[in-house]
Image (cartoon, grey):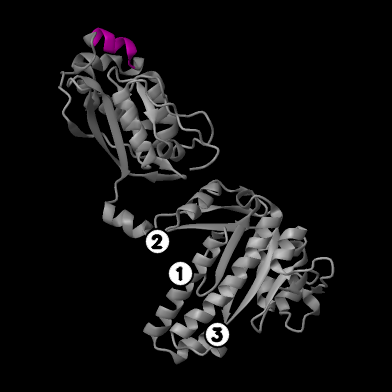
Amino acid sequence: MTDRLKSLPLPDDPNLAVWASALNDSGYWADIYDSGWLNVFATDELRLTFGDTGAGTVLPIGFHILSAEATRFRVSVIRSRYVLPEVRRAYFLEIGPYVLASTPGGRDELRRVVDPELADLVDQLESKDLPAVWLAPDASGTSGGLEVASVVTSIRIDDAHGNLAGVCNMLKPSAGMSQLAAATHTADLEHLERMRAVEHADRRPAAILMADLEASSPLARRLSTASYFAFVRRWVRAADQCVVDAGGIVGRHAGDGVVAFFLAETAGSESVAARSCVIAARALRDTLTEIAARAEIPSSDVSLRFGLHWGATLYIGRILTAGRSEVTAFGDEVNEAARIEACATGGRTLASKSLIERLNRADADALGIDTGHTTYTPLADLATATDKARRDAPSIAVCEV
């Protein structure tokens, strides 16, 4: 859980507090209402989905489930269907009978606490006793700029004497658990947290790593398609793991190329971000050798070229679509990193001066780099400089690491 988020206080009712604690600790989307239908708790995961990142919350904690405050939340935060008055009225008519049945003051009390735009519907309600469990109206809304379909299971919570203590609404994406598991079973939880940091695009200083397999086309022609696919799949998976283990964020994949970002804000400092970038590059090189040996490919047939660069003004964020989720960045430094990588033929790792000079003495020593005596070469002066490098980034100074 993000360090910036402070969990809400547990409900005063001990029965509700037990539920709230268990659901919060296990990472559920859930909120809890007391016997008077006041919202008394929301889990951290639910709050983060709705954009909470600090001590406060956008959820209508302390307000009635059918109050004007709850309506404003559904319209302004959940959005989606709830912006339509007819949808809000249908929601009221579906949940209202259960609320009416457990409201001590009956219709008059309910009419007093509900959103005035819905008060005329109170007389249409027929009380229904709360079942133990029921499928509540869906909570489809927006998350990360996309509409997210959800299902809600409502569970009655009784005290030790069988009296109503409250109601728990447990939400989940409408995808089945087998689909959710298939999408997430290999995910690293710490990496997901780092990806959350870039959910909203912004300028963020970061180290950039770009790597690409050299001479992969001849290798692909020599191997069977199935063998080459298995080799690339193992390589991509292992490469991503190296980035994750070094504290980075995996970027887009283009064929057998790798892009990664090491944010100063998640690493703790610019120096640590730069050090992590170099560490990841070295781990990637070792990993490729191991994967090639497993595939019975001579080590002379596989080689990686690396471009490492510092992005002081990167505009980086997460792109979500119906088919994928990826982190990408824009800015001159991204293009410069690509030019550095293209010049690193022969299996070299070229790092820019702007990246190396982010290292403090301790981090440089840990990498075995003497920053005080390192010499650099402009890309345009390299024998391996590409035409694009000479055109777009001739003065970028680099060294081998």
Amino acid type at image mark 2: Thr
Circles 1, 2 touching at the beta carbon (< 8 Å): yes
Amino acid type at image mark 1: Arg
Q: Which quarter of the picture shows residue 294?
A: bottom left
Circle 1: is it few (<14), some (14-19), or many (20+) Cα within 10 Å? few
Residue position for label 3: 302
In the rendered image of this protein, does residue 166 appear above or below residue 211?
A: above
Residue position for label 1: 237
Residue for point 53% across, 75% down: 287
Q: Is residue 51 left or right of residue 272?
A: left
SS assignment at label 3? loop
Q: Residue 154: horizontal and vertical position, in percent?
A: 24, 33
> Gap in Å between the C-alphas at discs 2 and 3?
26 Å
- Residue 222 seen by the camera: yes
Q: Residue 308: horizontal and vertical position, in percent?
A: 67, 67
Residue for point 50% across, 74% down: 255
Which span is picked out in magenta?
A: 107-114
> Gap in Å between the C-alphas at discs 1 and 3?
17 Å
In the rendered image of this protein, does residue 217 appear above or below residue 128?
A: below
Say whether residue 258 is magenta. Answer: no
In the rendered image of this protein, does residue 6 appear above or below residue 318?
A: above
Of the image marks 2 and 3, the number of the one nearer the N terminus: 2
Amino acid type at image mark 3: Val
